[in-house]
Amino acid sequence: MQYHIIIVVIIWSTVLADSRKIRGISLAYRRFYKEKRSFLCIDGSKIIPFEQVNDDYCDCLDASDEPGTSACTNGRFYCINLGFRPHYIQSSRVNDGICDCCDGSDEYNSRFRCRNTCRDLGQRELVEVEDRMRAVSEGLLLKQQLIKEGANIWQEKQSQLRDLQRVGEQLRAKMEAHRKRERKAEGMLGLLMPQGDDNRKKKGPESLTDFFQELDCNKDGSITVEEVQANVVSRGEEGRGLTEREALDLLGGHRQADLSLFRETLWRSLKSDSGVKMKEDLSAVGGVDQAPNIKAAGDGSADVKKMEEAYDTLQMEIRDLEETLSTDYGADKEFMYLLSLCVELAVYEYTYVLCPFNQVTQKSSAGTVLLGKWGSWTGHSEKRYSQMLFDGGELCWLGPTRSTVVTLACGTRTALRAVKEPRKCRYVMELESPASCDPLQGSRKVHNEL
């Protein structure tokens, strides 16, 4: 009989000791729960007898006296989870018949027995971590290739810009030359066209200056061989036009002459009646010489118009290239490969298309909706290139203008992982890219208890 009494006492003592065990606290807080005569609430608000710790009655305002029960509504229970990740749960979930801690420690006084799954979860997480680290390593190798590719694309774009700028300068010079010839042809044409409504014979010039101004068709202050041919004829042979050689001789062998040279050369010939004269009626004799000048003026105008159109197109290409080169493609141009790339993801009846540095659209049977145009990088200072903003999309019905935030994640491919609309017309996307891989991601340690 005494033997049985001793056994009962031992069992009761064990149960009592087990009930007094302080559960639900982390190693960092163990020092507050050393058994003694009194207990000071961790927030310092109250002192209670130590017997009232974990007695299923909430005495402390911060719930620190009941870490292992559900007595306090604001309490927390610490799951040690040896072999996996430790974490806190709400005290209300202690002994509720549901296993919240993988080691089952939250159901110590429950009729429901929990199986310890921490080791299995730890092994599974270890595999996931190793896979993630392997993906980061592969992503970093791919990133190095993308950096080289980005540098090549950048140099190619710069070379294209320089070539276009050089062609633009050449085309502009060519246009100026054509315009000058056009003005000269129009000047000759104006001289050859009849003056006045009655086509009466124009009164000839009388003075040196009058003759010079009459011959200076384009009013540039000089007389050229062509202008002499257009306005001076031979006195004999029924007003025969002059050859280029004859006109050149009349200007003393010069291709053009100012007023001073004109006085010493052609003016003397005109005054001495030595075989040449001004055309008496420019409109009358223009039938022979006018047509080529009209054609020259018309052809010149058409050529200048074509060149102006080509120049405008060229300038648009130059502006587009300058805008492309002004965009931030990452510290090492690692994101530049995305410039000519679009990725898409189907979600229910919609297909979302992301074209980095360009725009985001949503396609459906009803049509295509613009969800935003490229705006800027919006990641925080340490991770500037972790987030993209696309704004200025189409206006929502009774809502704001659509916009999209794209978060970039490390991966071995370039693809959209997810698309959500957490708020009306505010979209969030996750883009996987090797260019987002960071060496620090591969160096993170697995939890010590794994």
Image: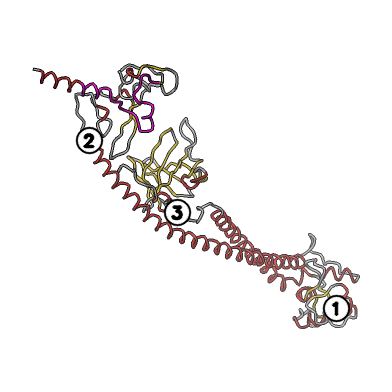
| Residue 254 magenta-highlighted | no
Q: How is the image coloured?
A: secondary structure
Residue 418 as seen in the image, left or right of residue 101: right
| Residue 15 magenta-highlighted | yes
Q: Residue at x 78, y 59 (%)?
A: 197
Badges 2 and 3: C-beta atoms under 8 Å apart?
no
Q: Residue 36: x percent and y percent? A: 35, 22
Check disc 1 and report the residue beneath it: 266
Q: Quadrant of the N terminus?
A: top left
**Is disc 2 placed on a helix, strand or loop?**
loop
Q: Return the mark for residue 116.
A: 2
The disc, 2 or 3, on the residue closer to the chain's N-terminal end is 2
The part of the chain drawn in magenta is 13-39
Residue at mark 1 to residue at mark 2: CA–CA distance = 117 Å
Q: Above or below — where is 245 with respect to 373?
A: below
Q: Residue at x 36, y 41 (%)?
A: 350
Numbered label tally = 3
The disc, 1 or 2, on the residue closer to the chain's N-terminal end is 2
Q: Residue 296: x percent and y percent? A: 67, 69
For the residue pair 221 and 290, the one nearer the viewer reads as 221
The crowd level at tag 1 (other Cα within 10 Å; few <14, some 14-19, many 20+) is: many
The crowd level at tag 3 (other Cα within 10 Å; few <14, some 14-19, many 20+) is: some
The disc, 3 or 1, on the residue closer to the chain's N-terminal end is 1
The crowd level at tag 2 (other Cα within 10 Å; few <14, some 14-19, many 20+) is: some
Q: Amino acid at mark 1?
A: Leu
Residue at mark 3 to residue at mark 1: CA–CA distance = 71 Å
